[in-house]
Image (cartoon, rainbow, N blue to C red):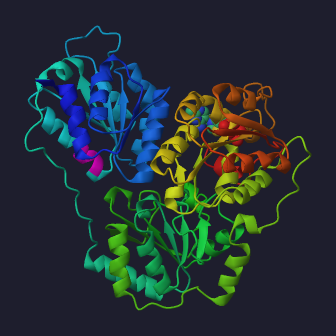
Amino acid sequence: MSTVAEVVGALLAQLGVGHAFGVVGSGNFHVTNALRAGGVPFVATRHETGAAMMADAYARTSGDVAVLSVHQGCGLTNALTGIAEAAKSRTPLLVLAADTAGAAVRSNFRIDQDAAVRAVGAVPERVHTAASAVDDVVRAYGTCARQRRTVVLNLPLDVQAAPCELPDPLPTVAPWGVPRPDQASVAALAALIDGAERPVFIAGRGARHAGPDVAALAERCGALLATSAVANGLFAGDAWSLGISGGFATPLAVELITGADLVVAWGASLTMWTTRHGELIGPSATVVQVDDDPTALGAQRPVQLGVLGDVGATARDVRAAVTGGPGQRTEEVAKRIAAEGRWNDLPLPSGGDGERIDPRVLSAELDGLLPAARTLALDSGNFMGYPAAYLAVPDAAGFCFTQAFQSIGLGLATAMGAALARPDRVPVAALGDGGFLMGIAELETAVRLGMGLLVVVYDDAGYGAEFHHFPHDDHGTVRFPDTDLAAIAAGFGCAAATVRAPADLAVVREWLAGPRDRPLLLDAKVRADEPSWWLAEAFKGH
Ligand SMILES: Cc1ncc(C[n+]2csc(CCOP(=O)(O)OP(=O)(O)O)c2C)c(N)n1
């Protein structure tokens, strides 16, 4: 007779979870091994936050449900920052959390796990008894996969140990169909589009599965295309794409988005980041939002029309209903996008003084060195506009932006989870020195996995976002002595180099040409005399 722990692991493997990550302790030992025995690959990380972020990034990049496995109490609390990020991003992440037995009221590990995960936006679930175990797992998996929710399935130790059998036949969880918009909404949106002269479409996370549908409608009605940061890459290669809307936008994108008379947000909630605190939406523009989640419609700012429906289905239905026209796809706009549509088209500052490289130059040089088939993940901080602006990505799966909770320290593990989902691409983690040192434990994991990961640290010897925010204050809390991050990374087993000038980047070419069987870390000593251009925008929100 098998146990509940074994049934939970085997059943999840059967239901089709994609990849598992975690730190194994006594409480999640058996369930993790049951997952592995069922064929689910598992990565043992060095910190639960790293595991949570790898699982989150894996799920975002692959589209599959990913699993995080943690020990009861402290294993779960260590993962909470990552769970919050996943929950805010509606990542289909299933957390298997061991829990103390109901009667173990004095256990050191005891906390109110339901309350803890509910507090960060995840859905608490529980395997209640051996008799209900299968139903409990199916319910948790269904909520996770069908509703794109981050679900924490608590597994009390006494229930885990109880005898249990896999049912025959095994249950299945079929996906739900996509919700189509109602006809009146389709007609209303089609009329607005046909009446617009300068339509712009902004696609967000909810459009990542539907890029071609949105682009096809845009083509018919002459709309220009942009994305929120999370959907960066969705329209890569489209001649009418303006790139990212928001703080990272090019001057041309700012001009054309601000000049739109109709802005349609596709699976984008038009946050202060995407609209630069509303500045990118012209005062007379009509704003429409399309989303399959009614609570998202109008949540961030008022909209003249809210359309409830799947983004892809809505774009297809509206395409059949519009008359169409050239919109703002004129020869002049085409020429301008071709000439100044990317940050890399604009003049760069001089390289630096040989001691400190300019972060724009560093980013643009890396863009030229790296193959197009790449996956870019970012940490948080002053630096992050530079890689977002200058490093092109091949498509939306090529960009992993775990910034819904705005935590530093998540970027390295994010890059690793995305890398495992797309082993055909060169993964790049762009980090500040603060975020890198916070998440450094997973460098050992990357070396152990033989991961060909490029880690670029924009090293300004401090929390740049903070010392630029408060330029006239005491910086004793936010500046640090210069640290030899290349030596630290080499100690972990990475290839590593210090970068002070573009010529130092020759090491990247050599590493790319080689077996790429270990990470390369670049400790790029960057100029820190001025804040990045987008940070001034961000400060307005604090
Ligand atoms: C977990 C967490 N702690 C603190 C902060 C506040 N914070 C935002 S940016 C930042 C500094 C980041 O420094 P670094 O990673 O070196 O990047 P830089 O700003 O220097 O480019 C801090 C401490 C945060 N966002 N997340």
Vertical comparison of 291 with 25: above or below: below
Name the residue at the front extreme. 515
Name the residue at the top extreme. 106
Vertical comparison of 233 with 375: above or below: below
How many numbered marks have been drawn onto this rendered protein structure? Answer: 0
Q: Which portion, as a residue range, is magenta?
A: 141-145
Q: Position of residue 44 (x, y in %)?
A: 44, 29
Vertical comparison of 321 with 449: above or below: below
**Relative to 170, 324 lies left or right:** right
Report the quarter where the C terminus lies. top right
Q: Residue at x 70, y 53 (%)?
A: 386
**Relative to 143, 220 lies left or right:** right
Asked if the magenta segment contains residue 185, the reply would be: no
Q: Position of residue 497 (x, y in %)?
A: 76, 37
Which quadrant would residue 87 be assigned to in this image? top left
Q: Position of residue 421 (x, y in %)?
A: 45, 49
Res. 389 in view: yes
User: Which of these two is toward me, 217 or 3?
Assistant: 3
User: Which of these two is toward me, 379 or 298?
Assistant: 379
The quarter of the rendering in which ligand 1 is drawn is top right
Vertical comparison of 222 with 180: above or below: below
